[in-house]
Image (cartoon, rainbow, N blue to C red):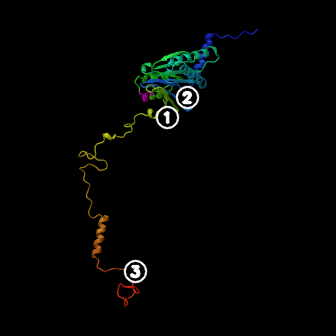
Amino acid sequence: MNMPFYVSPEQLMKDRADFARKGIARGRSVVVLAYEGGIAFATENPSRALHKISEIYDRIAFAAVGKYNEFENLRVAGVRYADMRGYSYDRSDVTARGLANAYAQTLGTVFITESKPLEVEIVVAEVGAQAADDQIYRLTYDGTVADEHGFVVMGGQAEQLGRRVKEGWRADLSLGEALRLAVAALGSGDGSASRTIEAAQLEVAVLERDRPRRAFRRLNRQVLADLLAEDTGTASGETPADDLPPAGDVAVGAATPGLGTPDTVPPEVPADTGTESPADEAKAGEAKADEAPAGDSTEESPTEDKPDEGPDAPGTTPGADH
């Protein structure tokens, strides 16, 4: 008689957790951080159709890392939950905390009962009327919920990237500063070599506090490139126009490029240089014409060759009617 293979519950849970963590670590990291005007989401994702950051409800957003088909099912389930609750009660009753609790129950049930856990890690964030009202919840593969403050990093190398974000994060960051910090963290990797991530390789969205109803906004590549670009007005080596001296206000004795100093007088050009200006040549030609004797012509025009004058008076044409 064959004995059934026995695995202790502790070993079974450990194996499932290791399996889920390895799958999540293979995904690209996602950085979520609060800034002065709301909450920003950034991740490296060259695809323009398969999103890792999405809108759930009016002021709630969703970000995930791991297997796309699994966290996409969770996103759709969250949208249905929010729509049903908002329709049944009121739109203000849809909160990130309620959505996070629903996700935690689903993830925990699958982790315990199913043979394979979900290889996902998600963030549910809600922007409030004030910075103190912002909510960021991080949910892991086993249904654990963590209430994060300020920022959160998930995915592969989350610990190294989290330390990089922690060094530069502060509550009064502008949107451009927050995005530059997030992109720098994503490009730092394991810390051995930093790389520059272009705007076309990024997926970025924000929850803006000042928007009246739907706070979610996805940033296109042109807007993202402008926000990531630093001020290079004076870094290019050009002198600002306001710093240039006004025309004519040149100090005496100051050197002028290409002209030497004002005290330097160019040497005089000798009179007999063998060359004349066009004006001098014209005057010389007129003088020679005045000196020539009147009527002294070397050749005549062919039109002036006429036969000997006949009986007709000069200046008349034979046969002409007068």
User: Can residue 161 be seen here?
Assistant: yes
Task: From the top left corner, tell me how far across and down residue 223 is, in percent.
Answer: 46, 34
Determine the CA span between mark 1 and mark 2: 14 Å
Q: Which mark is residue 221?
A: 1
Marks 2 and 3, how far apart at CA: 93 Å
In terms of secondary structure, what is the magenta stretch mainly? helix
Would residue 175 be counted in the magenta stretch? Answer: yes
Question: Is residue 304 placed above or below 89 in the rendered structure?
Answer: below
Residue indicated by mark 3 = 303
Instruction: Give yes or no for residue 82 being in the magenta stretch.
Output: no
> Which residue type does callout 2 highlight?
His
Q: For this view, does 226 lie left or right of residue 65?
A: left
The residue under label 2 is 51
Q: Which region is colored magenta? A: 174-178
Instruction: Indicate the amino acid at tag 1.
Output: Arg
Rendered view: 60 above or below 232: above
Q: Which tag, 1 or 2, sits closer to the chain's start?
A: 2
Tell me the element at label 3: helix
Q: Is mark 1 on a helix, strand or loop?
A: helix
Q: How far apart are marks 1 and 3 (CA)?
A: 81 Å
